[in-house]
Amino acid sequence: MKQQSNCIVISHVDKYYGKKQALRDVDLTIERGMFGLLGRNGAGKTTLMKTLATLHEKQGGEISVCGIPISHASEVRGIIGYLPQDFSMYPNMTVYECLDYLGTLSQMPRAQRQKRIEMLLKRVNLSEKKRSRVRSLSGGMKRRLGIAQALLHDPRVLIVDEPTAGLDPEERIRFRNLLCEVAEDRIVILSTHIVGDIEATCENIAILNEGELLWKGTVSQLLENARGKVYVAEIPVSMLAQAKRDYIVTGMLRSGGAVTVRFLAGAEDNNPAGRPVGATAAAESGRESGQGARGLLPGAREAMPNCEDAYMYCLYQHGCEIAGGEE
Amino acid sequence: MLFFKECKKVLFSMTFVLYVVTVVAMYVTQFIHDSTPITAPLRETGEYGMTVRETPEVIMPAAVESLFGEYLSGSYPAYPIMFYKNVKLKEDKRLEMRAILEELTGLSGEEIDGFEDSREAGYFSGGLDEAGNPVTWYQEMVLPPYSLPEDLTYEHFCELMERADRLIGGGSSYAVDRLPSFFGRVPMTYEEALAEYEALMAPGELGKAYLRLHCDYMGINLAVMPVFVAAGLWQQDKRARIQALIYTRKSSGVRIVGTRFLALVGCMTVPVLLTLVYTVYTTCGMYPQMHISWGSGLGMALLWLLPDILAVSALGAFLTELFSPLLAIFFQGIWWFLTMSRTELAGEVARFGLQVRHNSLGKVALWQSQWDNFLCNRLALTALAMLALALTVWLYESRRRGRGGRMSHRTGSGRREEDA
Amino acid sequence: MEKVHKTEIYGNILKVNLRRQFPWPALAAVALLALTKGMFNINALEGKAVAQPLEMLLVWIGPALLGTVFLPEQNPEIRDVVRARRTGYLQVCLLRIGYSALAVVLLVVVFAGIMRAGESRVLPYHVWGCVCSALLLGAVGLAAAGLSGNVAGGFMVCMLYYLASYGMGRRLGALDLFSMYRGSMGGKGWQFVAAVTLTVGALAVMRGRRQI
């Protein structure tokens, strides 16, 4: 197993909940900067995050965080900051008291606590709320308090689980920017099922599905992987249902009687499980006719894949059942 | 359907499982243990139990002794409305009480106050015997020698007792209508015991007798256990309030709270009904030669037990919604304890209160004399349940509309400070 | 230097918990004490009668104080945030158990003092017996609440034990909560042992399940 002092090394990790396997032979190295963990709900992201945060025990494999084996929980906890999916804190405490208490639990000396709390409250724009009770904070404020507590002891690793779920667009952007800033000098692992968050912030990503690691690499590699598989076509509304049945539609925009659909096609060779829908047949017929995508839907043209297309394509490529395009 | 979803939530909760355990345990350890067929009294035994009778010669000395003891100890137990109160009299009232005692004992005020060898009288009525069974228990008491005036009539005695009760603030054992049950216990004669046996064996009475005893034991449980299930369910909902509201956003508060309450009460009633059915079955087995009529007995059992489940659940839900589940449990636990310690095992049924007790297969006449009080008690408890339920609906709706101020913050919904 | 730092850390954890976790359970315990005083005659008692208020009502200060140890972190999200800190949640719980147990002792001693002032013949064994029963009932609540993750359920299990003790009498042997009232002046030590064993066992299981 690799031992590195500035990265997280996850090696063949398994995790079970009773008989259900939540993580299956996960093998991953995470280096400094923003790292995105992408996957559907129930893919195993939270389980992996909690395992890294020493809150869950793995059943197999090895994990080291900045060179410290995960079994040395106390040491690992000293260098990680964790923001859970639904951050919540003692509702009857004030914002300052909360941070001070959590700082104490992180064994920070008083002077350091005071300094860091003031600095972080300014940074997350909560200075004016430091005497407010936690229960009186809005969802966005609570999330900012969450990030402040996670950064309080200046951890080398920051683990944030679905941090933007439920935030309004402005708050979401603000939050993403804040994460990018803090990622300059530490490892930040961001778990989400919102592909836009990953696209906007992460260089390296991994995709989990049903506990298995489907893909790891950079965002540009993921995009490259989907190149030539994404098409756009303007079709009459009456053809929409048929298009949804035959292709994996990743986007559509109605305009009068027509609709612009964005869809994946031509991926059948890489799909080990195959997909018994029209997409495969249609793609083949297109290739046979030598007309490429133009044979698929009238007026179809190849498009540059975005992160969402690439993610969907990756799932499809690995045989995952995709219901998104069908009604 | 919302009702079945709520039922599922109740049925799979830990508190409900424990509730079923307590119902079964109480039934098996207390009731089934008691199930031996009733036989006619035998003259040669010479002892036929106790009965309550308004006999002035018995009541007057016992009541005066009790009042004297309480005067010397300086505290008078009383039960105004539903709570126990240990009353201490102020100086003017103490002197008035002393004057009553002077009249009743023939002693002077100085003689009464000068007696120093008194040990405090503990009129606790709800201890445990060696085997752990509840018994009435009096502490030994030393009083100065005295005798009742020979010209004291029962009417005048009752007037004095009424004055004493008023001084205590009402609800004491000296209230005239309570005197027989507190101080008029006398041994039963053979004829009375036989009459009681025959009354018990009358058509329709035997079944009722067994169901009364069943309800007596089950009532102990149902006066407290439902609060845990109710508080648990309401707390679970409070935690997931937002999801619940999204899921049922078209439903009215009445429907949401009402459905949940119905599911709660329905689920908790089922195990109780099953034990009732088992009682019917075992009793029929005990008296194979008799035709026992069960209709009115089962009606009485439901009228006895259902208000307990309704009231305890509704109060639990309301207090959980208003404050917290722990406060609901604390309140109910205290009420239950106070009621347990003050309710007679078989005697006068309070018109208002949490519990009805009749810990006897017999005493049919006593039970029949208390029927009106029983009805009043159960209806009052049901009314309390409905009031608590209505308040819960109101609270729920208030929170849903963002009202409720500080308390709403605890629930995860309601008004919150806006972002700066 | 390290020692000073640790003292400051644990001192602050204790201070915050005493200020934020302790008041409500303590208030409930004091209310129970006041209620016991109000409900029972506690003056000029002797022998078995002394045990009555102690064993029948005052013992509930145990569940009030110990059964609520996990209450602030009953919400799993809060618990996760706390557990992810360097100072283990177990240490926080042990600290709470420690001061709650001390409060049990203190309140029983205070109550015994009130009874003695009322000329009741309270013996040291009565105090010890009441403390042991309160701690055992509290440990039952703590274990049930901790293992089920449901504080209300914890109190329900306490109630079950209390009723079982009430109904089963001496058949519960050394674990009979009302043994002094039934005339036995021995065996409460086993309740203390049971309380400690139950607490340690529950914490060990919770630790094994990564709940603390």
Image (spheres, rainbow, N blue to C red):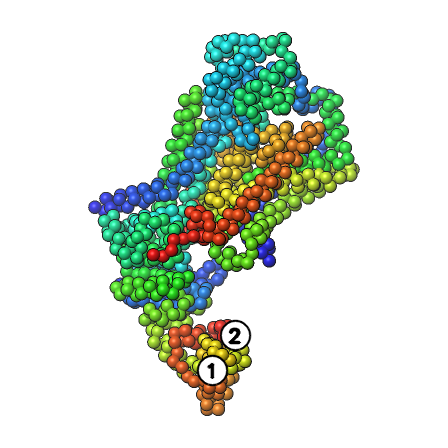
- In this view, A290 is above or below B144: below
Report the Cα–Cα distance between label 1 and label 2: 18 Å
Task: Give the crowd class for mark 1: few <14, some 14-19, many >=20 residues within 10 Å.
Answer: many
Q: Amino acid at mark 1?
A: Glu
Q: Furthest-left residue in view?
A: C1
Q: Secondary structure at mark 2?
A: loop
Q: What residue is rendered at 52% in x and 44% in y?
A: B318
- In this view, B191 is above or below B409: above
In this view, the residue in front, B247 or B5, is B247
In-image side of B150 versus C100 (left or right): right
Q: What residue is rendered at 63% in x and 31% in y?
A: B349
In-image side of B141 versus B176 (left or right): left
In which quarter of the view is residue C124 placed?
A: top left
Q: Amino acid at mark 2?
A: Glu
In which quarter of the view is residue C62 placed?
A: top left
In this view, the residue in front, B152 or B354, is B152
In this view, the residue in front, C72 or B354, is B354
- In this view, A290 is above or below A272: below
What residue is shown with label 1? A234
**Residue C139 percent location from the top left of the image:** 44, 40
Q: Chain of mark 1?
A: A
In this view, the residue in front, B371 or C148, is B371
**Residue A202 percent location from the top left of the image:** 33, 69
Which of disc 2 and disc 1 is earlier in sequence?
1
**Residue C100 percent location from the top left of the image:** 39, 38
Q: What residue is rendered at 40% in x and 35% in y?
A: C104
What residue is shown with label 2? A326
Q: Residue B278, labelled with which disc?
A: none
Task: Give the crowd class for mark 2: few <14, some 14-19, many >=20 residues within 10 Å.
Answer: some
Q: Secondary structure at mark 1?
A: strand
